Image (spheres, rainbow, N blue to C red):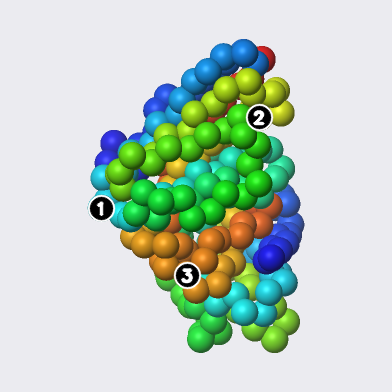
Amino acid sequence: GENVEQHPSTLSVQEGDSAVIKCTYSDSASNYFPWYKQELGKRPQLIIDIRSNVGEKKDQRIAVTLNKTAKHFSLHITETQPEDSAVYFCAASLANEKLTFGTGTRLTIIP
Amino acid sequence: ETGVTQTPRHLVMGMTNKKSLKCEQHLGHNAMYWYKQSAKKPLELMFVYSLEERVENNSVPSRFSPECPNSSHLFLHLHTLQPEDSALYLCASSPTIGLAGIQYFGPGTRLTVL
C-alpha cells in the first residue's frame, strides 16, 4: 500500500518568514495530494490540495508543489503569522481510494 | 455546530466498560470514516462506510465495532478496551467514496482508557 513520509516533525519560524514542509510518497499511481491543518484542540481541516496533472497550486499565502518524478510534494507558507501555528498533515491517495496520511508537522510561529 | 459533529467530546472508561461514540454529518455525504489519532503517529484509518455499507476494515481489533444505520450517522462501539487504545477518535465524511480526498472532519472524541 501507499506510504507517506513527512518532514520535519517540528518546525519553528520567525513571524514573517516562510515555512516549508515536505512529504514523499511511495505509490507512483497516487494522484491526489491534500494538506490538512489541525489547530490545537480542533479538527483537521483541508487547506489546499493538488492533483497529479499540475505541478503547483497557490492560494494566497500558501502554495503546494508536486514533483511526480521524485514522488514528493511540499507545502509552502509565506509571510507566516501567529495563526499559522498548528499541526499540518499531508496525505496521498489514488482516485476513488482512501487517504494515507503523513505523521504531521508541528509548526510554531515565533512572534 | 454544523457539518460533522461527534459526541461525547471526552470519554474516560475502564477496561471492562462498554461505551459508544457517535458521529453525525449534516452535509448530505454518502461516505463516512473513523480515524484514530495517537501522539506522534499518522492518522490511522479504521473503518470506511459508503451508503451504509462497510467497504474497508483496516485490521482493527474486534473490541472496536462500527455501526452505520444510515448515511448520516456512524457509531463506534467500544468494549474491553486497552490503555493503548487511548487516543483521539475522529469521524469524517466525504461526498462519495470516490471523492475520498475531500474529507470533512468532526471535532473528535478524546478517549482515555484506565
Of all chains, the one bearing label 2 is: B
- In 3D space, how far apart are the residues under numbered discs 3 and 2 (Cα atoms)? 29 Å
Contact (Cβ within 8 Å) of mark 1 with mark 2: no
Badge 3 element: loop
Q: Closer to the N terminus: mark 1 or mark 2?
A: 1
The residue that appears at 52% across and 66% down in the rendered structure is: A97
Q: Looking at the image, is B81 positioned above or below residue A99? A: above
Residue that mark 1 sits on: B28
* Subunit under mark 1: B
Q: Residue at x 59, y 40 (%)?
A: B36
What secondary structure is marked by label 2?
A: helix
Q: Are marks 3 and 2 on the same chain?
A: no
- Comparing B114 with B56, the one in front is B56
- Mark 3, other Cα within 10 Å: few <14 / some 14–19 / many ≥20: few
Q: Amino acid at mark 1?
A: Gly
Which label number is shown at residue A96? 3
Residue B107 x/y as whole percent: 43, 37
Say which residue label 2 marks. Answer: B85
